[in-house]
Image: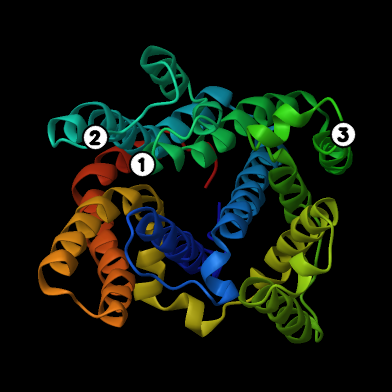
Amino acid sequence: MKRLPNITSLRFFLALLVVIFHIPQFFDNRGLPTFYELPLFDKGREAVYMFFSLSGFLIIRQLFEEKMITGKINLRNFYIRRILRIFPLYYLVAIIGLLYYNVILPKMGFDFTSNYNLWEGIALLFTFFPNILSASEPGGILEILWSIGIEEQFYLLIAPLILFISLKNIKAFLLIFTILFIGIYHMPGFEFLDEYRMMFFYFSFAGWCSLLKFKPNKYLGILQIVSGTLLLVYFTTNLFISNMSEFQYRVFSTILFGFFLIFFTQKKISFFENKKLIYLGKISYGIYMYHTIVMQPVGFILLKLVAKYNINDYIVIVSSYLAIPLITIFVAHFSYQYYEKRFLNLKRRYRNIS
């Protein structure tokens, strides 16, 4: 499948929003000074939801094209590709998190209280239900895995459905699924969907958007500017969230992300096609997965330095917002080159269409 323009770089900026969202939370919990007065610093949740939309936009389009070209979907190959992309880093971080909170911290003399049964937690992690474990607040390293679990749960459900639904009915199915699921998600009696953050509607609606036939025309530039401006306002202000109910905000977010991706991927934008940004997008999965691990030693070091040298609050804040993203990018780069690539290279064997 031909690579869509601009989208890889977008992953990096979404991952960065998640990182800067978690920094003040982590430092607040440890009594260190931090800054999050600007709305931009509080958009990590929305960045994850847009990751869902971006994922649905790409994967559902891929499944649809495979069925259109070959007449079927090779589920075995699809799931093997998902395993090779997701599992190595997911399980590595899960193991690190379990060891850190249950072995390393107690040996260092820190009292970390677990709100869950360890064996049940391990079972939930290793069967890809980290979103259920996340409700018990198992610690930041493990909590961020919730979104990875949601993705895989959705694709376990949707890929077989797309296989068995006739090609001409897939678009209608995705739209109906989105409307029904977002309605059920907010209905009394289904609170567990919200508790476990099973927001499948972001994936399905963006997938529907990816199948719409849009012919680039003279208005494309205007549509890119308008949708891009709306998205910029969405992530840099509280204009929408402050004037909408929770239900309205989720519906608006779902629609905004889906249609933005349509226009954003129609024509190359030189800024987003920068090779360095594209590479940062390629390692964005690692940036997302490793940043809560990186926060731990950075936080401990700054705690020691503040206690010993009484460092100015401004210096601590600037140091945290510089050190954590930069170290995380380095770790993600190292992981991508020397660990993840070993598995990613195997994916080529299981591609069904070019």
Q: Distance between the residues labelled 1 and 2?
A: 9 Å
Q: Mark 2 points at which residue?
A: 100
In the image, what residue type sits under mark 2? Tyr
N-terminal-most mark, 3 or 2? 2
Snapshot quadrant of residue 195: top right
Q: Which residue is at 28% across, 44% downward?
A: 340
Disc 3 marks which residue? 187
Quarter assignment of residue 254: bottom right
Residue at 23%, 49% in the rendered image: 335
- Dot 1, how many residues are within 10 Å of its Cα: few (below 14), some (14-19), or many (20+)? many
Please state which of residues 213 and 243 is positioned toward the viewer in this rendering: 243
Point out residue 88 in the picture as x, y percentages from the top left corner.
32, 34
Q: Which of marks 1 and 2 is nearer the N terminus?
A: 2
Q: Which amino acid is tagged 1?
A: Ile
For the residues labelled 1 and 2, say whether their Cβ atoms are less than 8 Å apart: yes
- Give the left or right position of residue 221, taking residue 336 as reference: right
User: Above or below — where is 277 with respect to 55?
Assistant: below
Q: Provide residue 91's location: percent of width, then percent of height.
A: 34, 30
Query: Is label 2 in a helix, a strand or a loop?
Result: helix
* Rendering coords of residue 310 (x, y %): 17, 74
Q: Is residue 18 positioned above or below 225 on the image?
A: above
Q: Which residue matches tag 1?
A: 141
